[in-house]
Amino acid sequence: MCVVKVGFLISYDFEYLKISLPRVYAQASRIYLAVDVDGKTWSGTDLTIPQEFWDWVKAIDTEQKIEIYYDKFYVEGLSPMECDTRERNMLGKAMGKSDWYLQIDADEYFVDFGHFVHKLKNFKAVEPTTVNCRVVTLFKALSPGYLTIDESFETLSFATNNPVYNIARNNTTGNQQMYWEDLVLHQSWARDEDEIWFKLSNWSHKNDFNTASFFNLWKAIDEFNYSCLRDFHPLDAVTWPRLKLLQGNLSEILDSGEINEIRGEARIGPKRKNLLSRLWKEIKS
């Protein structure tokens, strides 16, 4: 029997878990929610998670497969990225023995997690391996729907049989890198202004670019001018070539076929691998 364990990092965007966790619950062997025991973000900001959220977790856990993992994930003197990487390694160890270890952020939604797990269970890795998936980023919520990144080069690592991470949830040195076409929707930027500024002020990339300038750009984008943006990712411009407007609410977009029509570059070629390498190199420095 192939064991597939899933870990989530619970922080300021915990409410999004109400979308992401139900999409993986049935196929996961066990699920771990990592929470800072002192109620801190990676930047040391105080974080309060209401009891109503934990009541929801208890209610959804009908098969009793969710475990809350409390530990000290903020360390004074470490950068947000260093805290991020440290927490992911701690979570990997806390998950115990497994065939595959997945780490998913609360605002990341698999379009077809069942298909992804089926592929994992039939993939016989003979060496340390990381499986990267294609990601479509939600950039902004507007009255007609959501702006998403079109023609995106983005991938993120999700599954590994060797949970040793050196940059966030990536292992860029020891693991063989696999690139699969399974699609994940990332609600990274489609939030209200207060959430976006809090994210920019507290996430692990906050020291990697001019966050105030990017925040002003984000606020100015609407359904009338979005088509003017080209190559605008704050860390590696060509990662976000352009924007596309998807009509409808989030549930309609996730469950429709339209999300699968977002265009991406030649899927597994060296261009993507080189771009990913450059992106993480810049973040690391």
Image (spheres, rainbow, N blue to C red):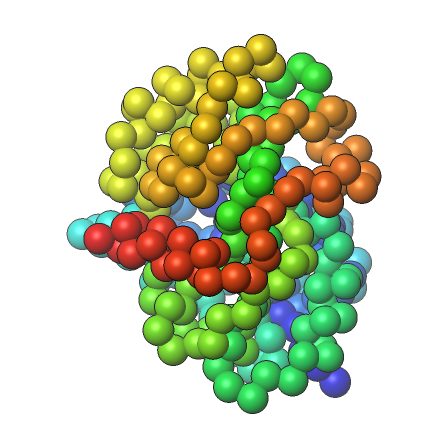
Where is residue 143 drawn, in percent x and y?
Answer: 67, 15
On the picture, is 270 further left or further right than 142? left
The residue that appears at 57% across and 49% down in the rendered structure is: 265
Front residue of 58/77: it is 77
Q: Is residue 251 visible?
A: no
Residue reaching furthest bottom? 126
Q: Is residue 277 above or below residue 92?
A: above
Residue reaching furthest top? 224
Q: Is residue 4 above or below residue 184?
A: below
The residue that appears at 45% across and 43% down in the rendered structure is: 239
Q: Is residue 160 above or below residue 8?
A: below
On the picture, is 172 further left or further right than 153? left
Q: Is residue 196 above or below residue 97?
A: above
The residue that appears at 29% across and 56% down in the rendered structure is: 281
Where is residue 93 drawn, in percent x and y?
Answer: 45, 74
On the picture, is 17 further left or further right than 130? right
Q: Is residue 197 visible?
A: yes
Where is residue 251 drawn, in percent x and y?
Answer: 76, 35
> Residue 214's quadrant in the figure?
top left
